[in-house]
Amino acid sequence: MTSEFAVVSRQAGFDAVVLAGGKGSRLGGVDKAALKVGGVRLLDRVLEAAAGARTTVVVGPVDAPAGVLVTREDPPGTGPAAGIAAGLAVVGEHAEWTLLLACDLPGAPLAVHQLLALVVEGSAEADAYCLARESGQPEWLFGIYRTSALLAAVEAYGDPRDRSVRGMVGPLNPVVVEPELPNAAHDLDTWSDHARWNAAIRLRTGTPPEDRTPWRPFIERVCAAVGVDPDLVDEDAVLDLTREVAHAGARAMAPVSAYILGVAVGAGGDPDYLARVVEDAATAAPMPPGGGAIGDGAENEPETDPDKES
């Protein structure tokens, strides 16, 4: 936690509702809340952004730290709007403001101070403030809302099951706040997002990237042995492909996918295009039982939506 964020969060009077009830369908059904990003569980990263909240509620089937309330939308699986209503319902004495966060926002602890500062400084004239996505549109589930207005919006919306968050909170006309850190409101929906966030967090924390330069002599030696031009071997692309496949399904299929890619490229296909085709096909495949899938306890387990409607 940055010192700036720590000071602001202590001064702000807010509750936090974190939505963690989605299916992670674009990640092959992986439990997003448990996915590790930069070595930290994604849910814990988002809960870091809620530090200082008077009451924190997580909506979803998760294991939460002590002191964090856990509830479910009723019935489970009926969407984030229903999750907002369920989260608000279990808060006892409401704070003046409520922070709404999706559990798939790795950048939440890096940017939430921008929203909390509005509350602390007393400059919050509107009833809602949302961080901007790349498109400049509000990220509804990265916002802070005046609780009285939010409760009224939930009441006015009626039955929230399987309805959009935008329909619920859009009438509050949130002010869109441009993030100081580019793409801070970018969520994590795909394995490509996962790779980008891992790289960004490593860069920000000073963790050095993996040094792959010693591997090149090995590649050149093997290529010489089999008569292949080593310039045709993009080890970064192959390693990224196998990591994505291993994270999304059976680990045993990672080298098989790399072999399929090699055969396809050898037949004259475009390597970049084929890598994406193979990755998409492999990560969409069902996990074979007992095939070394995510969650089997291996050391290299991926660092794991609410399926947000906008």
Image: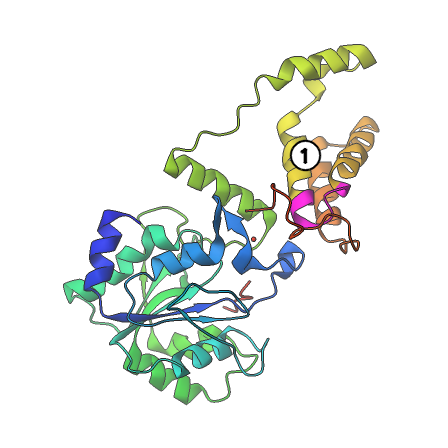
Query: Residue at position x 69%, y 44% from top?
Result: 245
Relative side of 59 to 266, left or right: left
- Amino acid type for the residue under numbered disc 1: Asp
Residue 1 at x, y percent in the picture: 31, 49
Asked whether the viewer can see residue 133, the reply is no
Which of the two residues, 128 or 82, is positioned nearer the viewer here? 82
Instruction: Work out whether 16 lies above or below 206.
Output: below
- Residue 251 lies in magenta, yes or no? yes
- Colouring rule applied to residues: rainbow
What secondary structure is found at the residue carrying circle 1? helix
Is residue 96 visible to us here?
yes
Residue at label 1? 272
Q: How many marks?
A: 1
Measured as percent of width and height from the top left, residue 160 is found at 50, 83
Counting other residues with Cα less than 10 Å from the Cα at mark 1, is it few (<14), some (14-19), or many (20 or more)?
few
Q: Quadrant of residue 169?
A: bottom left
Residue 200 vertical placement versus 11 (above, below): above
Q: In the displayed structure, does residue 147 sit left or right of residue 266?
A: left
Q: x and y percent of residue 298 in the render? A: 64, 44
On screen, residue 97 versus residue 121, left or right, reads right
User: Which of 181 and 226 lies nearest the eye of the viewer?
Assistant: 226
Q: Residue at x 51, y 88 (%)?
A: 159
The stretch drawn in magenta includes residue 270? no
Q: Is residue 209 left or right of residue 127?
A: right
For the point 32% across and 57% down, which residue is it? 112
The residue most toward the left is 122
The percent coordinates of residue 68 (x first, y second) are 40, 69
Taking depth in this image into account, of 281 and 94 the one nearest to the observer is: 94
Query: In the displayed structure, would residue 81 be above or below residue 49?
Result: below
Q: Which residues are magenta?
A: 245-253
